[in-house]
Amino acid sequence: MAATDAEPDGAVRDSADYEYDVVVLGAGPAGENVAGRVVSGGLSVALVERERVGGECSFWACVPSKALLRSGHAVAEARRVEGAAQAVTGEPDITGTLRRRDSFVDQWDDRRQVDRVHELGVALFRGSGWVAGSGEVMVRDVHGTTLSLRAARAVVLATGSVPDHPEIPGLDEVDFWDSRAATSAERAPESLVVLGAGAVGVELAQAWARLGTDVLMIESGPRPLPAMADFAGELVGAALRADGVRMCPDSVVESVSRTPEGVALRLSGGTEVSAEHLLVATGRRAATGHLGLESVGLHEDGAVEVNEHGEVRGVSGGWLYAVGDVTGQARLTHQAKYAARVVADVVVARATGRHVTTEAFSRYMTSANRRAVPAVVFTDPEVAQVGYDPARAERAGHQVRTVELDIDSVGAVLRADGYRGRARFVVDERNEVLLGAVFVGQDVAELLQAATIAIVGEVPLRRLWHAVPVFPTVGEIWLRLLEAYGL
């Protein structure tokens, strides 16, 4: 049948039922990629979205947060180079920074993404969708009209994640920021308390500090980025302090209250802090509470468990799939899109009678999610990591050796006076292949793809030694690490 979609205001044109080969719930990066790839495989697709097409990453997370960071980073980079530093006579312009951010999110208008979906031939339904049984999805639009979508081949859950707020006395009684509010703010606050020192917390703390906000960060542990290498947290923490961010390590928030000026927090040990705004950046959880999963025998609590084809475990018939944050696996936009490509290929293959192999790293398996997930924290310095850390490598049964060095090559010190960085390789000594890598420093994110390729390809270190890094670049650290290993 011809593609039918919702009116721009969210009203469904017709309350009749519709049938498609595939119905995708959620039009963020994962859902968009599933839909586009399935359509290119010759199947019909309906895409259901209750907010903006493009999702969290496009409008409230990856894109606006990096735009907020970039202005401050550019100024800081110039100040680290003699000759350029003398040209920097002021601070980052807040108005210009916010204007540039707004341009990247199209003023929070998803018309461009909607047009792209239409051009692909995907039917777009605006509204809240939920599973109502085998192959059936219900959609309710903003006016309360409900219709049924029938999926002949597959339903794909791509609803992402939502902020996970801690249970703190008084928190529900104050107007605190979540990551959305922090990335879409219309002005820089005078002061900000950041609760949480993971990737979101450190990025937004540095972004607003460099735009002139007085920032205090509350950490439950001794350093930022507790899930990453110690030296990553130490170097990022030092950079935050240099930017004027005050740190409260090993602290627990006992209560939160509203004040005439904003918000006040009482910490363990009796310390009291206050600010105009409080940003709660304590993690995210899978957005499953509205998906009707009980209709197919699943609990609507926690992430949706999937196999490496992206099929939801515990549901028979091979018709229900999930990708991205809703699965709890590798909550990163690029990995969500990777899983989307795999699931789309699986669905198209099964619909057209092709064999779906279980061979690792085939186009039908999300093998990289187990051992080769690249991630970057876009602070200054950047933190870029992929693969196993030493403890996880040992738990996986590898004979582990680590090599760790400062990044101090000519290429690095040419990039910035007083360049500070560090890198680590995690190696399987039996096979002499790379299992994991961490790089911390200015502009190290661009080193990560090479490490990811080395891990996925299981390239022997003795062969990597012949991949000569260009002089003078930050990438010379590759040769230094291999030499330190003994090659």
Image: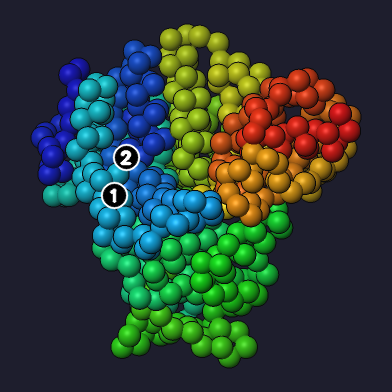
- Secondary structure under tag 1 reads helix
Q: Which label lies toward us, 1 or 2?
A: 1
Residue 262 in view (yes/no) = yes
Task: Estimate how packed mark 2 is, as few (under 14), some (14 to 19) or many (20 or more) residues with alpha carbons within 10 Å.
Answer: many
Per the rendering, the mark at residue 138 is none
Q: Taking 410 as reference, is 243 left or right?
A: left
- Amino acid type of disc 1? Arg
Residue 17 in view (yes/no) = no
- Amino acid type of disc 2? Gly
Q: Taking 73 as reference, is 381 left or right?
A: right
| Residue displayed at 58% across by 49% down | 416
Total count of labels:
2
The image position of residue 5, as x and y in percent, is 18, 31
| Residue 240 image-quadrant placement | bottom right
| Residue displayed at 66% across by 30% down | 471
As rendered, which of 143 and 271 lies closer to the eye?
271
For mark 2, what is the residue? Answer: 54
As rendered, which of 453 and 71 lies closer to the eye?
71
Cβ atoms under marks 1 and 2 closer than 8 Å: no
Extreme-bottom residue of the structure? 270
The image position of residue 377, as x and y in percent, is 54, 50
For mark 1, what is the residue? Answer: 100
Q: Taking 434 as reference, is 133 left or right?
A: left
Report, in whole angstroms, how far the alpha carbon at label 1 lies from the one at label 2. Answer: 19 Å
| Residue displayed at 60% across by 52% down | 417
- Secondary structure under tag 2 reads loop
